[in-house]
Every structure is written in C-alpha cells, then in structure tokens.
C-alpha cells in the first residue's frame, strides 16, 4: 500500500464555484463530510483537513545560531494550499480516482504527490 | 568453430532481431521484476551475451525468448548479489522460481508477451506523464530505439534525452503508475492518450528525411494495438489513418518542397496501403461506433479514392468534417473544414469561415497559408502575399517554408504577367 498527499490549491481573490450563500456553504460541507466518510469507511483516510488562511502562517528558520521567525507563508504567492488529505492507495490510478472525488466535492485543483512516511508513521 | 560458419551470421540480421526483441523482452521483464531499469539493464546484458554467442552458434529459432530467458537469469543473479536486490528478490521469489520449472519457461515467456507490451504502452502513455516524456519512453521501451536515436528524432542532445527518460522512469516508479491495462471504465480515455502518442510519433516523422523511421515505428505500434485490442475501433481508425497518410508520401514532396494534394501525382500513391486502409475504414463503418481517429481515416479514405483532385467527393468530405467537429471541436478541424468548403462554395465563402477562426489559430502557419491561397484565388495579391509571408515566418519545417516561398514567388510572377507588354 502506498500513500499520497492530495493538496488542494486556492487562488487568492478568485474562487470559482466557491460557496457564497449559506445554502451553498451547507451543501459544500455536506459533500466534504460525505467524502471523508467514504474515505474513512474504505480505509483510505490517513489524515487531512482544511488550512486557515496563509496570513495566519509563521516561517521559522535557522539564522546563525538563533531561530528566526517571519510573519506570513514561506512562499509569497497568489496560490496557496487550502487543505490536504493523506490517503492510502494501491497505485497512482487509485489515488487519481480519489483525487477526482475530492475535485468533485470541493471544486479546487488538486496536486497528487506520492508520500513517503518517515520515522514513526509507517506506510 | 570456424571463421566460415561465423560469417553466416549476418550482423544486420542480429541488429534487426535485437531491435524487434527489445520491446518484447523489456515488457516481459518489467512484469517479472516490476522495475524498468532492472529490466533494461538485464536486456542490455543479454544482448552483449547474444552478440557474442550468436556469432558462433547462429541466431536461435526463438531469439526473443532466448533474450528473455538470458536476461531474466542475469537479472536474478544480479539481484542476488546486490543488497538492494535481496529484498526485491525475496518479494518476487515466487514469480521468479515458478518460471524456472520444467516446461514452464517457454509458455510463461511467450504466451503473455503481447499482453506485457500492451500493459507497458499504457504505463508509458499514462496521462500523468507529460506528453514529450510519454513519446520518448514509448519509442525507447516499445520501439527499441536507442537513447541517441530517440534524441535525434526530437532534435535534442543525447544527454538531454537521457535525462528526460530518467525523469519519466522516476515518476513511474515513485508515483507507482500501474503496469496494467486500465479497467473497462477508464479504457476509452486512457486509450485516447495512447493513440495520441502514437499519432504524435507519426507526425514527428513527417517532412524530415532524418526521421522517416518514426513513421514506420508508429505504423508498427498502431498495428500492434489493433492486434492487442481488436474490440477498440479507434485503434483500427488510427492504423487506417496512418496507412492512408503514408500511402501518399511518395507524392507529397518534390525537390524538397511540399506538393499540395491538388497537385500530387496520384500514380505515385501506394495502392497496397490504400487498399489496406480502405478495408479498415469499411470495417469501422460497419461497426458504427465512430470516433475522432476513424472519422479522420474516413476523410483520408475519400481523398485516396479519388482519381483526381476534381473527382474528389467534396460534399462527403465536408459531411465527415462536420461529424468530426461535433466530436472534436478544435480550431484545426474547423480550419480543415473551411478548406474543404472552398472546393464546393468557392474561395470567398472559405475566406469568411477562415477569418472567423483565424484569431484562435494566429500562430498556426496553415491558417495563414490557407488565407493566402483563398486571397490569391480572389485576385487580391497584396493581401495574399502578406498572408503567405506570415505563414512562412511561422512554419517549422523546411518543405513547408520552401512551399510558401514558392507561393510568394508565383504571386510575383502573376503580377509580372499582368503588366502591359512593351512592343
């Protein structure tokens, strides 16, 4: 069994198909809940969820012997990761089939990338 | 072993066998070992052993089977030796040992060979790979072309092509692109990407004497796909399209310049290929499941059936383009349809259609070439010249540029003839 990171991307200022009314928001949440339940039931879901806006991020790095912190995301770009799932899948075709379901549910573009578990988390 | 016997083994024949066996052997070894690089290295080693042994013993009756057996044994030895290999060897111990059983080896290696190649072409042409990587990998692994040959076909250095192939193989391995024929539900979409890669290989072989082998390779791959997937009419459609296009090749250029369909010497067309292409198209029509490749083949079939340009069944061609546009609404299809319309409704009607689609295809030289042709026929030499010049500026191949330069020269000659003659 392999694992894949499905990261969902959002573009600042333009969110085509994003829920605008409370009804749309509710429908959106229902789709996400159903998707995650399906992932859970099939043993696909490892971990995942949505991220708060990049303005809430802090970058930490070594600067000489001190830790230096800067406000904001590591990459200043219009596009940012809006959320992610780590899933179990037999191969890329299986992972892509899940990616399609995620796209159908949340209407964001998705990057599918093979995940290599290190340390404690075993694939 | 005497020198006299050795001389019976034709070096060229060995080369040919290697090229034919490469795709089969690599595909089978990938099934056994699940790793492209292990398979390629083992086949390469088997070739070294073969070129030595065949020179003295002659070419064996089943050279591909010989290569597979030798390569498999080499790979198993290699895997036993290396630490990385031991783990892999344990994993696939079952597969490797069962194929050692008496009487099993040949059946296991020959029976599923075609299936192995089918699986491999779906891996190489997976839509998750960028097209230029898919094309290179297909030519290398299924076509048996050397890295250098693939590099020359795409006008890049051998080092750059080697890097491209390494990247593609890295992605297949790391992202686990599966090695199997896609499920029934995914097959139409995935087959489309395989057929497009084969079509692209053919088109890359057009108009360049250095790359003509790509055309025969594409026809060979299309033929193999038809054999492997007899229930897929689009595979048959692609084969017919390639055969019908290829049949006109002997008449398509003269002195290094492109010759338009209207001016081609039709006696030079290859009748055998036309008959084969026509037979496939008729079988496709009987099946009644048209798709983009079958429709393009049908259009070529109509052209090939006409004894002269004037005798072409243009209404039939326009009807086929209408059908094609309904399943593949691309600007290029619209362009070809407009050109066909000119033959029925005249250049003014065609120009109106062309002007409507031109903004979408501004960097495509054939739009400007077609506009130039229509403008010339309408007696607007200055506008025609501007269009041909733009086309020549955009054209990528030498025969295309030479053809367009000829058009510009002919416009100048038209103008000279129009001048009042001095007594």
Image (cartoon, coloured by chain):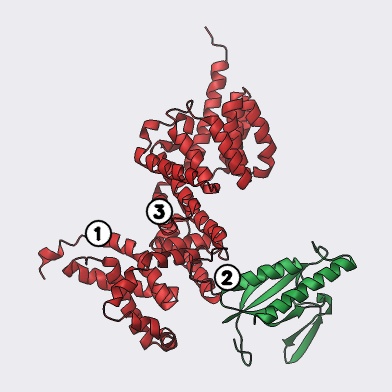
Q: Quadrant of the N terminus of chain B?
A: bottom left
Residue B140 in sight here: yes
CA distance for labels 3 and 2: 27 Å
Counting labels gives 3
In the picture, measured across the screen, residue B122 lies left or right of residue B322, that is left
Q: Are marks 1 and 3 on the same chain?
A: yes
Q: Which residue is mark 2?
A: A93
Q: Residue furthest right?
A: A22
Q: Is residue B142 above or below residue B291?
A: below
Mark 1 or mark 3: which comes first in sequence? 1
Give the numbered dot on residue B13: 1
Question: Is label 2 in a helix, a strand or a loop?
Answer: helix
Question: Between B56 and A3, which is closer to the camera in this rendering?
Answer: A3
In the picture, measured across the screen, residue B79 lies left or right of residue B179, that is left
Q: In the picture, one chain is green; tell me its letter.
A: A
In the picture, measured across the screen, residue B70 lies left or right of residue A46, that is left
Question: Is label 3 in a helix, a strand or a loop?
Answer: helix
What is the drawing colour of chain B?
A: red
Q: Residues within 10 Å of mark 2 (few under 14, many from 20)?
A: some
Quarter occupied by residue B42: bottom left
Q: Residues within 10 Å of mark 1 (few under 14, many from 20)?
A: few
Q: Position of residue B27 (x, y in %)?
A: 40, 69
Q: Which residue is mark 3?
A: B223
Q: Is residue B321 above or below residue B203?
A: above
């Amino acid at each position: 069994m392999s694992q894949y990171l499905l990261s969902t991307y959002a573009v600042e200022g333009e969110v085509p198909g994003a829920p605008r009314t409370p009804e749309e928001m509710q429908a959106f949440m229902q789709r996400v809940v159903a998707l995650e339940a399906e992932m859970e039931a099939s043993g696909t879901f490892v971990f995942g969820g949505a991220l708060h806006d990049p303005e809430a991020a802090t970058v930490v790095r070594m600067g000489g012997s001190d830790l230096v912190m800067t406000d904001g995301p590591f990459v200043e770009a219009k596009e940012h990761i809006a959320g992610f799932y780590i899933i179990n899948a037999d191969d890329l075709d299986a992972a892509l089939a899940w990616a399609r379901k995620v796209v159908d549910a949340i209407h964001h573009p998705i990057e599918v990338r093979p995940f290599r578990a290190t340390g404690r988390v075993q694939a | 072993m005497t020198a006299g016997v050795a001389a019976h083994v034709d070096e060229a024949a060995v080369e040919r066998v290697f090229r034919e066996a490469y795709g089969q052997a690599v595909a089978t070894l990938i099934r056994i070992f699940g790793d492209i690089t292990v398979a390629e290295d083992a086949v390469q080693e088997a070739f070294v052993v073969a070129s030595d042994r065949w020179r003295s013993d002659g070419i064996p009756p089943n050279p591909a089977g010989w290569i597979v057996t030798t390569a498999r044994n080499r790979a198993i030895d290699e895997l036993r030796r290396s630490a990385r290999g031991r783990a892999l060897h344990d994993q696939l111990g079952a597969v490797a040992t069962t194929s050692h059983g008496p009487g099993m080896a040949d059946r296991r290696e020959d029976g599923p060979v075609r299936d192995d190649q089918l699986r491999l072409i779906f891996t190489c042409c997976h839509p998750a790979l960028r097209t230029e990587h898919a094309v290179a990998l297909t030519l290398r692994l299924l076509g048996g072309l050397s890295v250098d040959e693939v590099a020359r076909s795409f006008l890049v250095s051998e080092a750059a092509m080697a890097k491209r192939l390494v990247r593609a193989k890295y992605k297949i391995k790391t992202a686990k692109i599966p090695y199997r024929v896609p499920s029934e539900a995914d097959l139409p979409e995935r087959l489309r990407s395989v057929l497009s890669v084969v079509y692209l290989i053919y088109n890359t072989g057009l108009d360049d004497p250095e790359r003509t082998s790509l055309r025969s390779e594409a026809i060979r791959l299309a033929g193999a796909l038809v054999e492997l997937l007899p229930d897929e009419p689009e595979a048959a459609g692609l084969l017919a399209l390639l055969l019908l296009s290829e049949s006109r090749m002997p008449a398509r250029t003269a002195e290094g310049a492109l010759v338009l369909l209207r001016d081609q010497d039709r006696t030079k067309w290859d009748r055998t290929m036309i008959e084969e292409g026509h037979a496939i198209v008729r079988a496709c029509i009987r099946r009644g499941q048209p798709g983009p490749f079958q429709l393009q083949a049908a259009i070529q079939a109509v052209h090939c059936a006409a004894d002269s340009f004037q005798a072409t069944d243009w209404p039939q061609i326009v009807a086929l383009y209408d059908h094609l546009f309904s399943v593949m609404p691309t600007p290029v299809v619209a362009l070809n349809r407009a050109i066909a319309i000119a033959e029925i409704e005249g250049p003014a009607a065609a120009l109106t259609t062309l002007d409507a689609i031109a903004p979408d295809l501004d960097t495509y030289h054939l739009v400007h070439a077609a506009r130039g042709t229509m403008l010339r026929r309408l007696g607007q030499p200055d506008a025609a010249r501007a269009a041909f010049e733009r086309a020549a500026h955009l054209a990528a191949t030498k025969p295309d540029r030479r053809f367009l330069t000829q058009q510009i020269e002919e416009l100048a000659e038209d103008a000279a003839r129009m001048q009042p003659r001095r007594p």
